[in-house]
Every structure is written in structure tokens, then in C-alpha cells.
Image (tube, grey):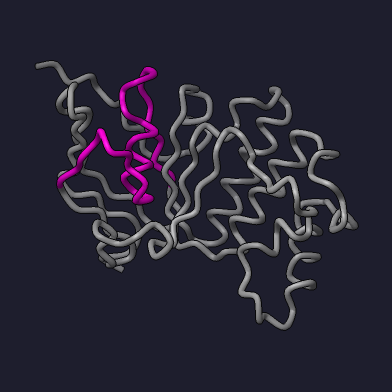
Amino acid sequence: MADRGFCIENLTITHRQQGVLLSLSARVLPGDVMSVMGPSGIGKSTLLAAITGTLPAPFSQTGRIQLNGRDLTALPPQARRVGILFQDHLLFPHLSVGENLAFGLAPDLDNRRQRVCDALADVDLVGFEDRDPATLSGGQRARVALMRMLLAEPEALLLDEPFSRLDAELRTRMRDLVFSRAKAANLPVILVTHDREDAVAAKGQIVELAEHRA
């Protein structure tokens, strides 16, 4: 169990013009949530980009990122097995709800249709397989995006302000749903948020990113 979860070792992200943006060492165990907070521009989403392998050209990184004992640092994004949810619940508009969910499943899987139906039933969306994503409410889109990600069977979950555009009641329900699903799947979770209430609800460690000054 010593190598399970996220292990971020001396990760430093540098911007070509601005210099060092952030430095971080952290450990997130399976089933736990680490919340990362700080003002806009401090590097919260850039940290997630480094973990997913999508860091844009003006940035560079040093250090090491491990997940369940695998060194992710040099792996392409598709090999990292890291799921991510954004504040915009990006569903493919040209695909039905069911086709969106099936996107993360292997094409030769015999029970793809049943897996999709079961996933929708798990989030109280029975019969939504053929619905157009454009007809869904914000909360319904959020639930579909969550289940699509979980069907891909990631080894970890990243949350980039996924609750920020939901109203207060729906925000609480979605937050509880995401955290409970991640815990049930024993996934290590890193949450980026501006909202301390989100971080407190996660019931895990809270990391406050500080501004680096030359």
C-alpha cells in the first residue's frame, strides 16, 4: 500500500516569462481528497495540466508525479489513467446521452449497452440513453459527465471547479455524489476550488498555493 495513490515529489512548474509558478510535494491516498486553493492565476489548473500531461508550451516542469507506483511524468495523457471533471460539463453534442457514456468503454465490450443503462440508473437518469445532451439540465449534464468519466475506469480523479456553476442546493448534492463515488471506487482525488466550503466538504487536506516572487 506504500505506493498507492498520488505521490507528487518536488514538482516545480515554471512559466517562460514569469518564472516559477508553483512548487509542490504532496501525497493523496486512495479514497482521500486533497483540495488545492488560491487566487486566480496562482497555478491551480496548471497543476492539473501537469498531472494529466497537457501542460501548454509556455510552461515547463521538473520533479516527479507517481500514481499507484507508476511514474506518470513522461507518459502521454491517454496512458496516465487519470479522469478529470471541469466546471463546464463537456458532453459531445453530436452524440446521445448513451453514446456519450459509451465513449469511454472498449468498443468490443459485450455488455456496453447494459453498462450504460446501469450507470444512468445509478444517478437517477433511467431511460435517458437516447436523449440529446442539449435537452438536459445543468445537474443532469453534471451527472452524465461524472458517470462517463467513471466508466472509463480511471485510477485517479481530478476536479477543476466542477461545482462552481451549480446553484447552492444542486452544488451540495453533486459534491456529495462525486465524493461518495470517488471514495467507493477508492480513487485518490485532487480538487481545485476557490470555494472553501467545497474544500471543507471534501474532508481532506487543504493546500493553499502561495504566490512566488522573484
> Residue drawn 47% across and 38% down?
203
Specify whether residue 37 is painted magenta: yes
Q: 177 or 136, which is in the foreground?
A: 136
Whether 101 is drawn above or below 164: the answer is: below
Q: Is residue 139 left or right of residue 28?
A: right
Q: Furthest-left residue in view? A: 214
Picture quarter with the N terminus: bottom left
Q: 91 or 156, which is in the foreground?
A: 91
Q: Which residues are magenta?
A: 33-62
Q: Is residue 122 left or right of residue 34?
A: right
> Residue drawn 67% across and 80% down?
109
Residue 48, by quadrant, is: top left
Q: Is residue 131 left or right of residue 92?
A: right
Percent of width and height locating residue 192: 43, 33
Specify whether residue 153 is painted magenta: no
The tally of labels here is: 0
Percent of width and height locating residue 82: 44, 56
Whether 7 is drawn above or below 177: the answer is: below
> Residue drawn 58% across and 33% down?
87
Percent of width and height locating residue 90: 63, 42
Q: 116 or 208, which is in the foreground?
A: 116
Q: Is residue 129 left or right of residue 88?
A: right
Picture quarter with the C terminus: top left
Percent of width and height locating residue 50: 31, 45
